[in-house]
Image (tube, rainbow, N blue to C red):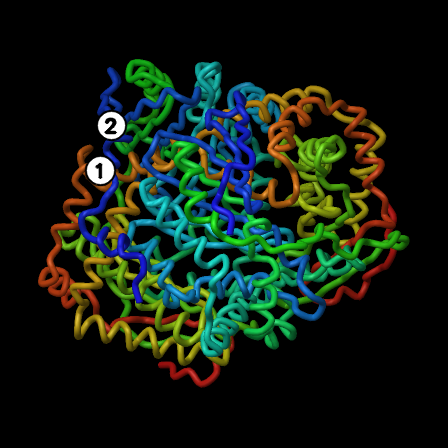
Amino acid sequence: MKRFAVALMALVWFALPVQAAVEIQDITTPGGIKAWLVEEHSIPFTALEISFRGGTVLDRPGKRGEVNLMMATLEEGAGEMDAQGFAKARDALAASFDFGAYSDSVTISARFLTENRDDAMQLLRQVVMEPRFDQDAVDRVRGQVMSILRNAETDPGDIASKAFNAMGFGAHPYGSDDNGTFDSVAGLTRDDMFAAKSRVMTRDRIYVGAVGDISAQELSTLLDGLLGDLPATGPELPKHIDPALTGGVTVVPFETPQSVVIFGQKGLSRDDPDFIPAYIANEILGGGADSRLMREVREKRGLTYGIGAYLVAFDHSELIMGQFSSGNGSVSEAVDVVKQEWAKIAADGITEDELDIAKTYLTGAYALRFDGNGPIARILVGMQMDGLSKDYIATRNDMVNAVTLAEINRVIKRIYNPETLTFVVVGQPEGLQTN
Amino acid sequence: MKHGLIAALIAFSTPAFAADVSTYALDNGMQVVVLEDHRAPVVAHTVWYKVGAADEPMGKSGIAHFLEHLMFKGTDKMAAGELSETVTRNGGSDNAFTSWDYTAYYQRIAADRLGLMMDMEADRMRHLQMTEEDVATERQVVLEERNQRTDNDPGALFREQTRAAQYMNHPYGVPVIGWRHEMEQLNREDAFAFYHRYYAPNNAILVVAGDVDPDAVYELAKTYYGPIEPTPNLGPRVRPSEPPQLAERRLTMSDPRVAQPSVSRTYLAPERNPGDQKTAAALSILAELLGGNSTTSFLARTLTFENPKAIYAGAYYDGSSIDEGTFSLVMVPKPGVSLQEGEEALDAALAKFMAEGIDLDELARLKTQLRAGRIYAEDNIEGLARQYGEELAIGLSIEDIEAWPDSLQAVTPEDVMAAAAEVFDRRHAVTGWLMPEQQPETQQGANG
């Protein structure tokens, strides 16, 4: 019995006006740096997100982990300041700078108060232009990376990722850990840090999003001062690779009570014209708490705490992936259910009702992403890197709503391939058929 | 039945936060708190029950959390799963969480759906239904959750053992997720017994945050929550308390899945109390100065910079609880440094800190950051809603919550050292060694 009639009436027509809250200004600095800005003056601070396309795929042969170690050591001293001096200067301004290294990008996420914006940016400029990479700092951070590598060796989730990536991508950078190996990290030098920085932080690959208490003019001046003296161009990016996933189940034996499972197959790129229907299809199969996989594996059978699937659009490859954990005694049944659901959606597609529910959820939930200056700044950078236009925020929900049942079922037939769905299981699974 | 007449209408102004905070009480005893942020047309609707794992009957560990899962099963009017489905169909997301002191349910959704959320949340406050089959399947789900969070992670298993040793009598020593052998026996009757006793408007706090008008929220709350009958005679939240702790406890655990050995020490520590947060404020500052910042804190400087023995060293204070909290230290030794040496280095650092006192520049920088933190916090209205919900649920008042930032600013170096001297008592401590395999040279009773 449906008591909450308003909920059903709300289907389809409902979507929040995101664009009202997010007015993007598109600026180009005198120095040629492009940036997107949302002015938001009610709180006296700015969130600044800077991303450089490239990332850890630009590690040189034999130097796996150099970009990761470099980004982790950036903040350990700059200009006249050693690590202690830099941390003190930053904290006295109550600014925060986070540095990230990912497969396809390296990122700087900064947050600073209006009252000392210039000082905070002077400090960040020293990190960007004059990092010290002191030997003791490199060694200290190297020790932390080694500790992460040791932990990954006995973490079932990390073991599963490593095995899955190696299977899918082999010698391509996507096939190995961004952190590097014990051997490669041990061999990295101070010079490698300087070299890695000048390879990945270059002007031709910058994407900027800023949200907060700052004007377009102020941002423009700030960015030229901060980034204007970086090298003009970076090295060539790797070639596209199709994942070598041909189906089957691989078990990596590991003594632990619950098996961790990663599964996946080839996906589709962000600029594929079918991306939006594929995104909706994934939402229905494995997106949220109400997905088919959650219903079948968790709600009906109690085989897992959580299961999800997602589209992975790297810059140079594409996957549809998923993950769950299940007790060693129940994981075999859970793997079977996932296979059945994959076969089922590939054979029969989805229903009109499922499509309507997914559209309502996706169009309504879109606005929930824009919750705070930092998250919005990251969205602005993500949109630029994906080649989306400024008005995407205003039109994205219309694109979702325009997808027809015939179209999405065509796309499902095109992308879901149960034969190539490949599983990696780490644990001591009972009664699991492997190949 | 009462009809939600206004019993109290008190609005507090809080110039410290951009979000305006208002609070009301419904006639049936339910507290309503509204945090305004009109930057986006979104609302967080959260209901906090003043009951958690530390209120469970003996032998029923995990029932508070298990009930939290079963709350999604259905009511007299809603089918199993319908609440979440309705949230989804309205473009929202929902979830819930359980701690020792509270259980909370929340939805994030378009602000104009607030009434619908209240309608459903009020419905499941009193009209929960579940079949034996629902209970059996969901019990498997929480056992898999335990597998995932705890049994598959030796660090989590060791924290569980440490806590059980830290609290000799208080139920804070029992894990929120439950002990596996007791979780396996939890049933429908256990869940209903707990539910009927504790899920009531006079045991609940509603915190609504976002693009809403406080008066309108109050009207909606009266409409949906107002008619619910309170549970009479809900006594004060008194749990078994700790006896004098007279002996340090020392734990060693070996697990082949441990890749990185570590030394930990937890001390029993005073918690925040209504009208009295001075010691807790000093302990918060102490944790930051001693081991909060990974570069400039005392332990980081001493153990990872000056004479490096550790890959990582840190300190934490957990005092947002109804009863006594904990103050924790951890050090992860560098390769080649044994746990014995690691513990000695940690104790030597602690002794040095007690002898030298605190760095005044470091304290000044910390206070600057805390002041700025309040500005940054305004950007995260849901974080603020969560903070208000948690702190009200442990018995603090709005005045206490708003006084906390000032309490932190008022902490003096003497306060910090006095709090440290009070807390760092090895008789109240659990010292733990977590390692990959039994180390033959293991020695007991190291005193640094």
| Residue closer to the observer: B380 or A32 | B380
- Please tell me if label 1 and label 2 are on a single chain: yes
Residue carrying label 1: A393
Q: What residue type is labelled 1?
A: Ile
Relative placement, left or right, of B290 versus B33 is: right
Count of marks overlaid on the render? 2
Question: Residue at 82% across / 27% down in the picture?
Answer: B356
Image position of B236 with respect to A217: above or below: below
Cβ–Cβ under 8 Å for marks 1 and 2:
yes
Q: Where is residue A255 in the image (x, y as percent from the top left)?
A: 56, 73
Q: Is mark 2 on a helix, strand or loop?
A: loop
Question: Residue at 50% across / 44% down in the picture?
Answer: B206
Label 2 resides on the chain identified as A
The disc placed on residue A24 is 2
Relative placement, left or right, of B201 versus A306 is: right
Quarter of the figure that contains the C terminus of chain B: top right
